[in-house]
Amino acid sequence: MNAFVNNPSRLNWLYRYKLYHIPFWAAYHFMWWTVAIGNPFKAADAIFLTPYVMKFLFYVVFQALAAYFNLYYLIPKYLEKGRFTRYISYLLLTIVMASLLIVPGYYLSAFLSGKTMQEAYGNNGDCFYQFLGNSIPSTLAAMTLAMSIKLGKNWLQTQRKQQLLEKEKLETELNFLKHQFNPHFLFNTINSIFFLIHKNPDMASASLAKFSELLRYQLYECNDKQILLAREISYMENSIELERLRQNDNMELDVKIEQEDAGQWGIAPFILMTFVENAFKHVSRHMDRPNWISIELEQHGDTLTFQVSNSTSDVASRDVVQFGGIGLKNVQRRLDLIYTGQYQLDIQQDAHRFDVHLQLRLSPLEMPQPLQKIA
């Protein structure tokens, strides 16, 4: 026991290859032998102290292999993708093959005990009988049990994930409401536009349009689980342009956006904006050297790469993760729940800069179909 505790690699190997399931299958088959014989001590004696242990091992090994082949290959490749005919065909073939491979265990046990099949198993010593009467029903029962456990576990995980998503959605909506109507942001933006009216009326008009579009998006267009990537990018661009108005001349802003057909892809709302808001909130305010923010977005097919970097100071770099925007920890939880296994997030920070690199696999957004006119 201590060897395994002190050596994590052995534990990882044990879990990676599901070897900890072996006791389960041994106990499962021992239970059936106990039911058939009627006494657990006689069952243990028949299994471990006679050549019939070979028959027992054949059941344990080949039924376990069949069950895992079904759970980790057939179900993900065929059943979960709706290819039901192929799944049922391959499942039946797997059951038959596993049952056939169990039958030699009867012959090997009889051979090791120095008996013929008839002597070892009486009138039930026929190969065909062992196949139809014992191995097939037993294999079918074992695979049904394994599928029930696996599907039940998946259902519980899905329910738990759904509950976490609902909880996270409520928390996020509260944070959004607090952030959307932040008086400091509203008053500063309106004040900047007010001064622009006299200085540059055309720019003021364009900024007011962006501000109106931003509020409309926040209030009405971001309540779904997925929105168009193009809308999220447009919102981000409008927010960046409004932030430009509030920055002084000692702040360099570099924005590069490269996308191909972003209109067909969906994304969870405010995933990208969290990192942008974080950069503007925690960018350094040096008076003696440049302050800067760099934002790069690339979208090719279903792959989105998003990078945000900003200069920072010692104090800001310590607090940036905990207090940035709606919180980088918050958005990472959302990524874990919504994009499980479909994203990579790398956050690096030091005394002078803060870097975020996000790679996300997008999914097409299903647009509502227009209502058909009834002739």
Image: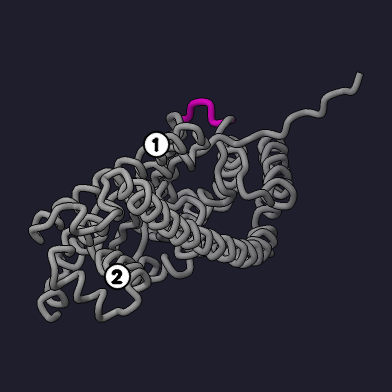
**Is residue 47 in view from this perspective?**
yes
| Distance in Å between CA atoms under marks 2 and 1 | 28 Å
Identity of the residue drawn at 20% across and 64% down: 14
Q: Which mark is residue 30?
A: 2
How was this image coloured? one colour
Q: Nearer the viewer, residue 73 or 286?
A: 73
Queried whether the magenta region covers residue 231, the answer comes back as no
- Horizontal side of residue 371 vs 325, given as left or right: right
Q: Which mark is residue 211?
A: none
Query: Which element carries disc 2, helix, strand or loop?
Result: helix
Please tell me how crowded label 2 is: few (under 14), some (14-19), or many (20+) other residues with Cα within 10 Å: some
Identity of the residue drawn at 12% across and 81% down: 2
Quarter the N terminus occupies: bottom left
- What's the amino acid at mark 1? Tyr
> What residue is disc 1 on?
90
Q: Position of residue 107 (x, y in %)?
A: 17, 51
Q: Nearer the viewer, residue 168 or 123?
A: 123
Q: Position of residue 214 (x, y in %)?
A: 67, 46
Quarter the C terminus occupies: top right
* Residue numbers of the magenta segment: 259-263
Q: Most extreme residue toward the right, as rendered?
A: 375
Q: Position of residue 7 (x, y in %)?
A: 12, 72
Taking 215 as reference, is 18 above or below it?
A: below
Queried whether the magenta region covers residue 262, the answer comes back as yes
- Horizontal side of residue 49 vs 65, given as left or right: left
- What's the amino acid at mark 2? Phe
